[in-house]
Amino acid sequence: MTILEAGERGRLSALDEPPAGARRFVITGRVQGVGFRPFVHAVARRLGLGGHVRNRGAAVEIVAAGDPDALDAFTEALHRDAPPLARVRSIESRELAPSETPAPGPLRILESAGRSGGREVALFAPDVAVCSPCLAEVDDPADRRAGHPFASCTDCGPRYTIATAAPFDRERTTMAPLPRCARCDAEYGDPSDRRHHAQTVACPDCGPRLALVTGDGERQVGDPIELAARRLARGGIVAVKGIGGYHLAVDATDEDAVATLRRRKARDARPFAVLVADLAAARALGRVGSLEERLLASAVAPIVLLDRAAGSSALAPSVAPGVPGVGVMLPSTPLHHLLARRVGRPLVLTSGNLAGEPIVLDDADARERLGAIADALLVHDRAIRVRCDDSVVRPIAGGPCWIRRSRGRVPAPITLPRPLAAPTLAAGGHQKAVIALGAGDQATPGPHVGDLDSLRAVAALDEALAHALALGGPEPSRVVHDAHPGYASTAWARALATARGLETIAVQHHHAHVAAAMAEHGLVGPVIGVALDGAGWGPDGTVWGGEILVADLARFRRAAHLRTVPQPGGDRAAREPWRMAVVHLDAAGIDVAARALGRRAAPRALAAVRRMAARGVNAPLTSSAGRLFDAVAAIVVDDGSLDRIAFEGQAAVRLEALALTDDAAEPFPFAIDAPDGDVPLRLDPRPLVAAAARAVDAGAPRARIARRFHLGLAAMLAAAVGRIRAADGPADVVLTGGCFQNALLTEETARRLRAAGLTVHLHRELPPNDGGLCVGQLAVVAGRDAAARARS
């Protein structure tokens, strides 16, 4: 029987006589805020089924009644035809007894109810970029939503950042103070309308409402978007209230305006992202292939890091100095669409915050903290419940590498390869901080918070946790944190554990990196994990950062690492790459004093750095790959511009930018020491450093030196992994850690490993940087839980 035939029989059954059968369904997953109830209503109406559908706790409950064939067709449709934003995790169904069968009549959408029973984890929808039909209405002068900055429907609009509790209904969002007008209410109740049961439905009559105000709160008279566009065209700075917080906007083609923004925001060199109106404008700034186009135009609407195109010269030099590409984004809301179109040229759109603080989300806080930066604020009366900065992605090796997983991606869960024995909170790391809640086999990361260098940033962890719990997240009985005792996230986790009586668990930094990559790909191990980053606490008391581990989820062993060198000045060396250049040159037997770097350094400072290194005073031993990149960058770019840097990774980004402009194929030499006994291999970078320094002395092109260093490091990593594999090591290899945000290093390392017959896994869902640590921490705890069950 066809669905149409089933529907005809079902209509007669539901409307004219008692139903022949009835079933109850409980559907879990991302099924709230995605148009699932309207979808169920439409299918039931087509098939002539009666009953009801409603949100119930974290799930959707359906009671469907009618002809058995129609019920079978309905069940098939639930599995096959769910709305595009939905992610169905499970469908449980049972036949109902005649006493439970609803009365004849069409299926109705009921008000939400409490939990459906059992342990549930709510999977909320992320915020979704504005869809094409809504934009068409905004651009249509004859439509009643023409020019409306907040148009949305069941397929788009804010979700996660406006929700205040579960289930997802308007009264439990920050839209609650904005009641629907009569026309919106009619759309909401019309099964044929795409806004049927859309919780964010709005129009110019019922709000939200936009205003342009000065720093002291004075409302400006006129069209707010037109007024903001005029200010931007005159070189002004405007703070714009978005979905997950405020942005700071400025004309990206006006060097004076961009420089003013940098000065006021105290952001010396970190690249700014650029908002453009459409794909054609994006293509004028960067190379947009099929992958880049899909990412730009996706429902996430992230910042996509593009290789520069010839048209990027139209951007002010201060937009993205010293980097190989430019971060470009398309409008994620009608508000951004209208503003970009009205201005008519690229806009810098950067996080609205002071240096070292999280993005601002509150209106009063915006006036206080951004008033000295922005000339005006474009505000509205829909509150933001939780801050959620823009997601950032870079195409690497034919797929997406998420640098920041936030707006549009959270709170989408990651499935763990092993289930957790109890609900667990993961505190993440100190930089690029993200927390995650885990229950069963689901790990749910929160939004990007940023570096925990301020009290406001640490307080944002509390806000993220409170929001996750309010949306139905499980109350944790334990908290897992990084093993580094000095991380602010570690202190936060321990304080929380004391206050709430939670068990605390520590996980080594690089094991968590490897486990995060394993979790993405459903691997239980063992794997060979190549983890390269700036720093992580090592169990031997040194600073790790250039590691090759053999690991499963529960345990690891250090199979190889970069040869250690002193890090003079501790964290100060991460801000002053010349210090690492000195120790690496000394280790390689290269005369520092005879070089430009040695001549630039003050004699007393140079002597102090060498004393610290020689005596081990404030100079911890480190195997950091990040510090090696810093050192080589300071050697190769020897004009002094990288002696001191403004942000983490700046020197490495500059070195990669140089390398990408050359096509050399010959790597610099390297060495691998293989000590006797069960001792890790030592990857010796001294030949790499010496070759780079001598090439500089010989006047070789700087781009060629940078590229040959990258190739040499990739070859050294591949050779070390090959030795580990040859000694009965695993065939699966994961590449993880912040250094694998470097496209050239990642692609060259992966190419060599695959050529050797190994299976290489790259990050595609989580950032390789510390933003993925929280999921890795949960994966390790789940692995330990599984090991404990196996022993019992």
Image (tube, helix red, strand yellow):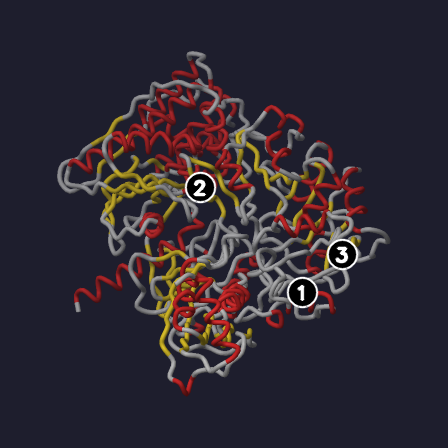
Using the image, determine if residue 13 lies above or below residue 204. below
Q: What residue type is labelled 1?
A: Glu
Q: Are the residues at dot 3 and dot 2 in contact (C-beta closer than 8 Å)?
A: no
Residue neighbourhood size for the residue with mark 1, other residues' Cα within 10 Å, grouped as few (<14), some (14–19), many (≥20)? some
Q: What residue type is labelled 3?
A: Arg
Position of residue 726 in the picture relative to residue 58 (left or right): left
Name the spot of residue 486 as percent of width and height, x first.
42, 55
Could you say which quadrant of the image residue 768 lies in? top left
Position of residue 223 in the picture relative to residue 359 (left or right): right
Q: Mark 1 points at which residue?
A: 187
Position of residue 243 in the picture relative to residue 592 (left or right): right
Numbered disc in front, either 1 or 2: 1
Q: Residue at x 26, y 61 (%)?
A: 784
Q: Which residue lies furthest to the left in this view?
A: 677
Q: Which amino acid does label 2 sit on?
A: Cys
Q: Name the residue under label 2.
A: 401
Secondary-structure class at tag 3: loop
Using the image, determine if residue 635 lies above or below residue 453. above
Q: Residue furthest top?
A: 698
Could you say which quadrant of the image residue 91 lies in? bottom left
Q: Calculate the distance from the C-alpha at mark 3 to the C-alpha at mark 2.
A: 40 Å
Whether residue 723 is visible to the viewer of this picture, yes or no, is yes
The residue closer to the viewer here, 681 or 200, is: 200
